[in-house]
Amino acid sequence: MNREQRKSSYRGYILLGVLYVLIKIGFVSAGYLHPGAILHGFIPSVLTFIAGAFALKECQKPTGTFWHKTMMVLPVLIFIITPIYMFLKEKSEWLAQGRLAILIVYGLLAILQFLLALRALKEIGKQSILI
């Protein structure tokens, strides 16, 4: 994989991170969620954006850095924390009124981000073997 293809993995990761908050804004605008729910979308957006941006900046380095490993961990945390947070916050109504759709979308975004991070980390490993 050449340098531009690797950079597209990082950019895709960042774009998926931005979608967390944009999707929440869409659901709030449609009336499915209360405005405070945007904060829950903002937190993973900011964290994954920062991790992806710093990893993109350091993609020239031959070994995996802290940011590349953080790119792997954040989607897993989002995948685990989101349903727990929704359940604790909403109790018996946690999958009602559009929340199941958010849970599915967040799960898919987290899986895609994890796969992109895994792809980038594998390419860094291949690069370090060649050096």
Image (spheres, helix red, strand yellow):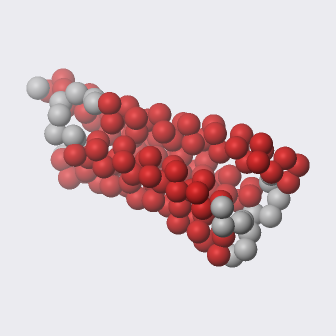
Residue 77, by quadrant, is top right
Left/right placement of residue 14 relative to residue 102 reads left
Above or below, 20 against 78 in this view is: below
Residue that sits furthest to the bottom in the current view: 30
At 64% from the left and 39% from the top, the residue drawn is 81
Along the line of sight, the residue nearer the viewer: 29 or 130 = 29
- Figure label count: 0
Tell me residue 51's x, y (percent): 36, 43
Q: Residue furthest right?
A: 92
- Where residue 110 appears, as percent x and y from the top left, is 53, 46
| Residue for point 58% across, 57% down | 39
Q: Residue furthest front?
A: 36
Q: Is residue 27 left or right of residue 66?
A: right
Q: In the rendered view, would you say 127 is above or below 12? A: above
The quadrant in which the C terminus is found is: top left
Res 113 visible: yes
The residue that appears at 75% across and 63% down in the rendered structure is 98
Which x, y percent locates residue 31?
73, 74
Q: Is residue 6 visible?
A: no
Front residue (pair 91, 111): 91
Quadrant in which the N terminus is drawn: top left
Q: Residue furthest top?
A: 129
**Residue at (65%, 45%) from the top-left corner?**
82
62 up-or-down from 58: above or below? above
x, y percentage for residue 96?
82, 59
